[in-house]
Amino acid sequence: MELSGDDRREPKDERGGPDGRRERYRQRAARLLASRWWRGGIAVTVGALPALAFPAPSLWWFAYVALVPWMLLARSAPTPRRAALDGWLGGLGFMVAVHHWLLPSLHVFTVVIAALLGLLWAPWGWLVRRLLGGGAPGPGRAAAALVVLPSGWLMVELVRSWEGLGGPWGLLGSSQWQVPPALRLASVGGVWLVSAFVVVVNTGVALLAVAGAARVATPRSATSPARSGVPTGPTSTTLPARADVPTGPTSTAFPALAGILTVATAAAAAWAWAPRPEPAGHTRVAVVQPGIIADGIASADKRLAREEALTRTLVGRDPDLVVWGESSVGFDLADRPDVARRIAALSREVGADILVNVDARRSDRPGIFKSSVLVGPDGPTGDRYDKMRLVPFGEYIPARSLLGWATSVGKAAGEDRRRGDHQVVMRTGRDIRHEEGHGRDHGLRIGPLVCFESAFPDMSRRLTRDGAQLLLAQSATSSFQNSWAPRQHASLAAVRAAETGRPMVHATLTGVSAVYGPEGSRVGSTIGTSASAAALYDVPLATGETAYVKWGDWPVHTALLVLLALGLTEGLRTLRRNSGRTAPGSPGTPGAGAPEPPTPGPAPEPPAPHARTAHGSPARPGR
């Protein structure tokens, strides 16, 4: 008897409802992830997601879940090598997204640098699979993930924060620059502690997602392991589950919720008990932003004239200090005494010292320096700070003999700038303003930074420990005027202020200029990228020592200890495993005198039911 056409069709999927659709989506996703190219593209995309938490989008809340897709992707990798590759490609996507505004200047070299720095995330991707891979992790492995994965992320941030690798631009904790509880945490452990806590929350959410998926798959896993989403083949190399430890969804969710609750509790404790800066008077600081000046032979003269005109608008407004942006003066003041006299005369008119930034070849030393110079009514006061940390490719080319070709594909530095060798705290000629009856301090102590030095938490911490009462960053981001860079740069001042308990002024040539108080809150309004203006700010001052200033980068040191402990534990486990396999005389060990036990074969499969015909009778062989 032959089957009719309708009877030869595949049986219909009984799960035609939501479960069936979910299964079909899962199968499609599995096919995409099995493709090397599709999976690589997905890794780059999910790695780029955290960039949305930074300015200009400033979706700060998104930072707490932005890493989850990346984690789930690395977790699903069939092999440790693939997980490391997911980490690398995700790191590539993150670095390109955070630094995309460099593309017009460095072109393809931006992607090359991002690919090299992305390698730092390869071990992190491996760790994600090691701790989250397979089925729902047990409570011990889940708790370990909540500690180890943030520690691994901090190590990545620490290594790439080295000046030669581009500096600490885009540290995850910096995305929380406008969140007061996060800024309070920064006063305790710097931007590092905020980064760690953000990754803890992401890890907790990822664990909850894994637990939820395991809960959905559990009813089917008993009858159809292949549909449970848990690897069952020889490629599964995740941690074996112990028989005495529960590994169900509930045992995974509990540590995840505990980790998230710990972050919330720590933030509340820091808000309530962390030392707060003590008010110590105030000072009036004017920021002069000249705006866009067309490049050309006379651009330095035109910029100086614009700055002079804007500064004169401050006459009669009683500022204590006037701050110009980076590269605001294109002449060495010793070589051009006429320019020094003009600025000194301006200081007398306004009644305040002027902090300028000279970007020129020095007359007393070889090379070009970027220097913060304080000019008073009688001329330069003698206080000078030479920029110490230079922007790779923008102000110097690392290994120029090898990478000098970068100048031919982008706007890389044609000549290396020279570095300063120490930080400087300057004293202005105006006293700090106190409320009546509280006296006056003699001179305001200021700590200047230049350009992306404001991204380095250790530099502002050093200035604070050296006695600076006001931090200043002179910057110029005119090359990236219509990008996210100006807002990203200005936001860093809020984090530095919160870390140190000192107000910070971010003064630029073309915006965004901003001022932040001792707790990281904004003072007054910002000066945008389209403005040419002079603004006066009444800046609150503070005394006291934050926990970060006192103890420094302790979260990074703690993370290093965690990773060392993990390495030691894994090493001991490997040694025990190897010694158990090769120890002489152990029962069942080849070569130990005892016969090797036979390897059990596969369990016999149950007999398949007989096929049936359209009339329900068993099919006969041969028909």
Image (tube, helix red, strand yellow):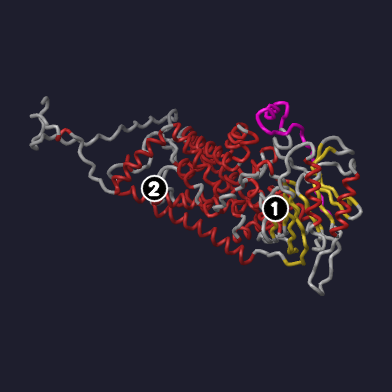
Residue 428 in percent (x, y) is at 84, 57
Q: Which mark is residue 243?
A: 2
Residue found at x 73% / y 67%? 279
Name above or below for residue 78 compared with residue 190. above
Magenta stretch contains residue 407:
yes
Placement of the C terminus among the 4 image quadrants: top left
What secondary structure is marked by label 2? Answer: loop
Q: Does the magenta stretch include residue 622?
A: no
Q: In which quarter of the image is the N terminus?
A: top left
Q: In which quarter of the image is residue 72?
A: top left
Task: Please state which of residues 357 and 214 is positioned toward the viewer in this rendering.
Answer: 357
Point out the stretch of residues depicted in magenta.
398-426
The mark found on residue 513 in the picture is 1
Q: Can residue 83 be seen in this view?
A: yes
Residue 38 horizontal/vertical position (percent): 44, 34
User: Which mark lies nearer to you, 2 or 1?
Assistant: 1
Magenta segment's dominant SS is loop
Label 1 sits on a secondary structure element that is: loop
Specify whether 270 is left or right of 296.
left
Residue 414: % across, % down: 74, 31
Marks 2,1: beta carbons within 8 A: no
* Tag 1: amino acid: Ser
The location of residue 166, given as percent across then percent down, is 67, 39
Which of the marked residues, 2 or 1, is nearer the chain's N terminus?
A: 2
Is 362 in front, or is 464? Answer: 362
